[in-house]
Image: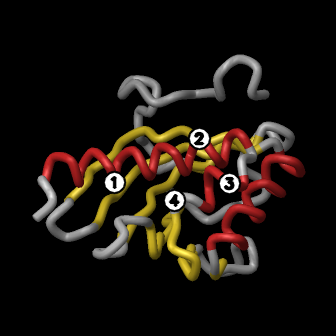
Amino acid sequence: MVNSDNKKRFMEQTIRKYFEGCNESSYDKMVSCFVKDAVHYFPPDMYDGPWIGADKIANGWIEAVKNIGSYWTIDNIIVDPEMDQAVIEWTHFKTKLGVTLRGAEWYLFDKHCGLIKELWAYYASPQNKQLKKLEIKGMDYIGRGFPNSPPDGQR
């Protein structure tokens, strides 16, 4: 049996590697985090989702970086190796649009290979085109230490 601490560490590293791949527009890095037929679910009317397949997921985020200047941070992460699941909170900076979107994702990992097989995206609010900050109303993001802008050089 795999050590629970090692499995937990691997799961967290996989999610972090996926986000690094997104920010770097690294197809290979992103694809290496998923089973081939992985599914990324989105809220209604978002990104023509769901995206089915590691290839579609990677290419979708490469396009987002190119077209809207996407940059993501992982703000919180909880991993449950016994359930093969994890949940994160993230911030998505759409730098070319001046938009900040907050949300969370639920991850399901394949029990056999340990890679991501599904992720379900939840957004803090509908993507109202008039809003520049899509966050949970009343949340003190700055006071809690969440980023308020992408790192220097990512704008």
Q: Position of residue 10 (x, y in %)?
A: 32, 49
Q: Nearer the viewer, residue 42 or 31?
A: 31
Report which residue position mark 2 lands on: 20
Answer with mark 2 or mark 4, whichever residue precedes in sequence.
Answer: 2
Assess whether mark 4 and mark 3 are in contact (beta carbons under 8 angstroms).
Answer: no
Q: Position of residue 60 (x, y in %)?
A: 76, 64
**Residue at disc 2, secondary structure:** helix
Q: What residue type is labelled 3?
A: Asp
Q: State the mark number for residue 46.
A: none
Report which residue position mark 3 lands on: 28
Q: How many marks?
A: 4
Assess whether mark 4 and mark 2 are in contact (beta carbons under 8 angstroms).
Answer: no
Report which residue position mark 1 lands on: 11
- Which residue appears at 79% of the width and 47% of the height? 65
**Mark 2 or mark 4, which is nearer to you?**
4
Describe residue 41's horizontal placement relative to residue 28 as left or right: left
Q: State the mark number for residue 33.
A: 4
**Residue at disc 3, secondary structure:** helix
